[in-house]
Image (cartoon, rainbow, N blue to C red):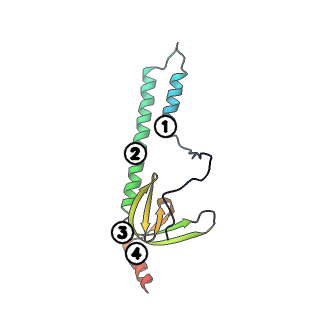
Amino acid sequence: MKVHDSSYINTSTHPTREVSNQLGKDEFLKILITQLQNQDPLSPMEDKDFIAQMAQFSALEQMQNMSKDFQSLKAMNLVGKMVYGEIDIENSSQIIPVIGRVDSVTFSNGRLYLQVGNYTLSLEDLVSVFSEEEAQKIETTQKD
């Protein structure tokens, strides 16, 4: 049974917009451009102010890249590990408990997914990762 299908089809005729509480590089650039367009021509932005803002933009972009790389590394290190996760069923208060070894990691629509048996877990669905000793006990219990 496949729980998550990476090919989501939006049947709504209205475009949807995802709202985030974080400013990304696109928002930062929009703010900077607006600031440059609306500055007083008799008192333009100082070079040092512009350079400082560009340095902040560069630092923000590097932090975002490092965060993505860290998440990818974290997911790749889970291959072969015994994990427990809970998948929320859409429009329901029910969950599907999933326990097993991570077979593979995929990247789809900007998110990382773990393949555990017939189930696909996002990193957000992950509840715990077991030590090898705990994993062997679980596998022994499942065989009995």
Dot 4: within a 10 Å radius of its alpha carbon, few (fewer than 14), some, or many (20 or more) residues? some
Residue type, numbered disc 2: Asn
Q: Which residue is mark 3?
A: 80
| Residue type beneath disc 4 | Ala
Q: Earlier in the sequence, mark 3 or mark 4?
A: 3
Percent position (x, y) of residue 123? 47, 60
Element at badge 2?
Answer: helix
Residue at the spot x=42%, y=40% of the render? 61
Q: Position of residue 55 (x, y in %)?
A: 41, 32
Which residue is drawn at the image coordinates 57% and 69% (left, top)? 95
Question: Residue 47, relative to residue 136: is it above or below?
Answer: above
Q: Nearer the viewer, mark 3 or mark 4?
A: 3
Element type at marker 4? helix
User: x, y (%) of residue 22?
Assistant: 53, 43
- What crowding class fits label 3: few (fewer than 14 Cα within 10 Å), some (14-19), or many (20 or more)? some
Q: Earlier in the sequence, mark 1 or mark 3?
A: 1
Q: CA distance from mark 2 to mark 4?
A: 33 Å
Residue under circle 2?
65
- Which residue lies most toward the bottom here? 144
Residue 17 occupies quadrant: top right
Residue wearing tag 4: 135
User: Which comes before the other along the chain, label 1 or label 2?
Assistant: 1
- Which residue was labeled with disc 1? 26
- Secondary structure beneath label 1: helix
Q: Is residue 20 above or below residue 52?
A: below
Instruction: Measure the C-alpha gap from mark 3 to mark 4.
Output: 10 Å
